[in-house]
Amino acid sequence: MIFALTFGMVALLLIGVPVAMALALSSLGALLLGGAPFHPAILSTKMQFGLQNFLLVGIPLFILAAKLMNTAGITAKIFRFADAIVGFLPGGLGHSNVIASLIFSGMSGAAVVDAASLGQIELDAMNKAGYPKKFSVAITAGSSIIGPIFPPSIPMIVFSFASGVSVGRLFLGGVVPGLLMTAALMVMVTIYARKVDLPREAFPTWARAAAAFVDAFLPMMTPVILLGCIWSGIVTPTEAAAIAVCYALLIGVFAMRELGPRRLLTVFVETAKESAIIGFIIAAASLFGWVLMRSGMTTQIAETLLAFSSSDLVILLLINLFLLLIGCFLDPTVSILIFAPIFLPVITAVGIDPVHFGVVMVLNLMLGLLTPPFGIVLFVMAQISGLNFEEVVKATFPVLIPLFLVLALITIFPILVTGLPDMLMGVAR
């Protein structure tokens, strides 16, 4: 069963079978080869059960909110505001790029959305200002993965679904790491700017800064409203996603008057398509995970890791290495759904906080979006920049250094993740 499950999935992925189908077919093959009797209805039952969780409603809602904001032209306003406040620093537009991604992450929660929507605006502005294209591509790709770390975060919702960990605590746990990633990338931009003498903007006048702030104020309130409502206990994270959609509609339709009936219909259709794809993946991964547990592989992995070491740091480093490797080949959603239930008993046994592990796991897998051979963000950047895939990979490599440093910091010092949720929501028991 284990052989059919693992090698079957890898073989199907290598020949180009869609991820969800590869998960479902390899699960079916493993059950047939396992020899133990099973009723065919168990396949549909397990897949359907995987979708029967209220928490998952937040995923299409956050996707919809991000698309509404993007279609309303808010991404350009965010970038202009970021440029107004940090454009005067060495490598000004590089800093603007990073800050804009941090702000936009409070609305999208997905790296690919950031790279595809805000990324095009950022690249155009940097190219017009004379920045090297490869540097522009690198910093745009690197800053895009702040989105799934800084709340709200779709991968955090998936991890919460797979592990049972509070999504509110996960959201708050991503705040400090998201800010650390922002700072690390800005330091890298500064060093590079001084090395090659990149251009910078003039120091902003009060009038320009105020105008940019007023222009971007309403969309920038999105993460403030969401986190405030979740932290205060007024709403659940899923209900906060619904509030985000309503807020985006109010801004796009009434405040900015950019969302007419045709645009709204397009946004709804695109959201439905993306949500269906994610839903199918979650359903197939639920079946895969059930077969994985039935095969006994989860118990074997846990026993092997615990036999190797009882040190929480050693265990976490080993899991980090594994996840970094897996992230190069598997979609983050699939990886979380499969491996979070496997590793949760292990990290609990050695005293690692599940919130800490969740944020570390998500950052690991987000780094996989920037690594070949299947880094989705790399393909997106190649498409919108005009560079070939190999050029994007080479250009993006230096950006991984500061991001890996942040990963090391939050791995070694758990308080960077757990400090804020413990302070605002109480110490978890």
Image: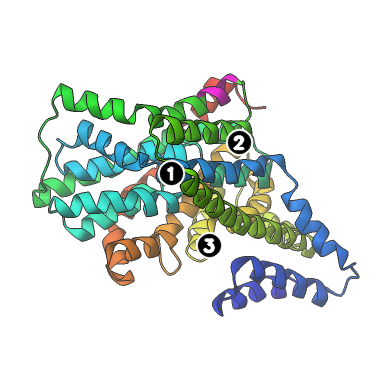
Horizontal placement of 214 versus 129: left or right? Answer: right
Vertical side of 286 occupied by 237: above or below: above
Asked whether 69 or 398 is in front, the reply is 69
Please tell me the numbered disc located at residue 147: 1
Please report whichever mark, 3 or 2, sits nearer to the chain's N-terminal start: 2
Indicate the quadrant containing the N terminus: top left, top right, bottom left or bottom right: bottom right
What's drawn in magenta, residue-wise?
228-232
Please tell me the numbered disc located at residue 314: none
Local crowd size for mark 3, using a 10 Å CA cut-off: few (<14), some (14–19), many (≥20): some
Q: Amino acid at mark 2?
A: Val
Is 332 colored magenta in this rendering?
no
Name the secondary structure under disc 1: loop
Give the CA distance from mark 1 to mark 2. Answer: 16 Å
Indicate the quadrant containing the C terminus: top left, top right, bottom left or bottom right: top right
Give the CA distance from mark 3 to mark 1. Answer: 20 Å
Q: Nearer the viewer, mark 3 or mark 2?
A: 2
Asked whether 214 or 265 is in front, the reply is 265
Residue located beneath label 2 in the image: 167
Give the CA distance from mark 3 to mark 2. Answer: 23 Å
Q: Residue at x 41, y 67 (%)?
A: 372
Residue located beneath label 3 in the image: 326
Q: Amino acid at mark 1?
A: Gly
| Residue 196 on image: x %, y % | 10, 52
Asked whether 257 or 411 is in front, the reply is 257
Please report whichever mark, 3 or 1, sits nearer to the chain's N-terminal start: 1
